[in-house]
Amino acid sequence: MVNTFAYSFLATELNARSGIGSVVERLRTMGLPEARAEEVQIALAEAVNNVVEHAYAGTDPGDVNIRCNLDADQLWINIHDAGLPLPDDKLPEGKPVDLNVPHADLPEGGFGWFLIRELTSDIHYERKSGNNQLSLRFEVSASAPLG
């Protein structure tokens, strides 16, 4: 049996924080194991924060639409927005950042896509009809291998 729900909010930092919390709490009540729920929360926060900070950069914030499909084996989270597309209409590589540099030389960003890729089993991005569509898949079993 697949449990499905949708959640939408305006793409602001405050709404993103409460929206992510609401989505993850709903997944917990639907039976997502706690260890996996924490990982989902991290990946979802990174993805949604990218929408808030980059997709709607320089424009009025629009909606972030999240749809979750949870069954016994996997969780799919689809995130849709009408903001700016990802550069070159494709996912960033998400390479690990070299941390063996002086503190002052550490990059301010660049960790998000690496984290998303590490925490998900599958990730897909598509720009369709002026909308960004990001799909994240997670194995449900807390002991399931990632990436």
Image (spheres, rainbow, N blue to C red):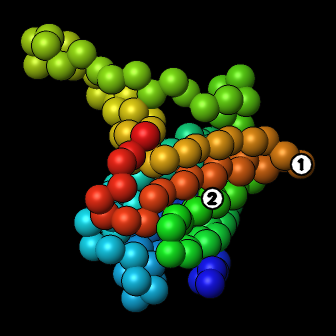
Is 103 left, or right, of 61 in this rendering? left
Mark 2 crowd level (few <14, some 14–19, many ≥20, 10 Å Cα): many
Quarter of the image for the C terminus: give it.
Answer: top left
At x 55% / y 45%, what residue is drawn? Answer: 122
Residue 4 numbered mark, or none: none
Q: Which residue is mark 2?
A: 79
At x 39% / y 76%, what residue is drawn? Answer: 32
Q: Earlier in the sequence, mark 1 or mark 2?
A: 2
Picture coordinates of residue 11, whole percent (x, y):
57, 61
Up-down relation of residue 24 to residue 91 (above or below): below
At numbered mark 1, what does the secondary structure look like: helix, strand or loop? loop
The reply to whether residue 65 is visible in this rendering is yes
Up-down relation of residue 5 to residue 122 (above or below): below
Is 102 left, or right, of 31 in this rendering? left
The three-letter amino acid code for the residue at tag 2 is Ile
At x 61% / y 72%, what residue is drawn? Answer: 69
Q: Which residue is mark 1?
A: 129
CA separation, marks 1 and 2? 15 Å
Evaluate if marks 1 and 2 touch, with contact meaning CB atoms under 8 Å apart. Answer: no
Is 82 left, or right, of 140 in this rendering? right
The three-letter amino acid code for the residue at tag 1 is Ser
Up-down relation of residue 5 to residue 85 (above or below): below
At x 78% / y 50%, what residue is drawn? Answer: 131
Picture coordinates of residue 20, whole percent (x, y):
44, 69
At numbered mark 2, what does the secondary structure look like: helix, strand or loop? strand
Is 133 left, or right, of 16 in this rendering? right
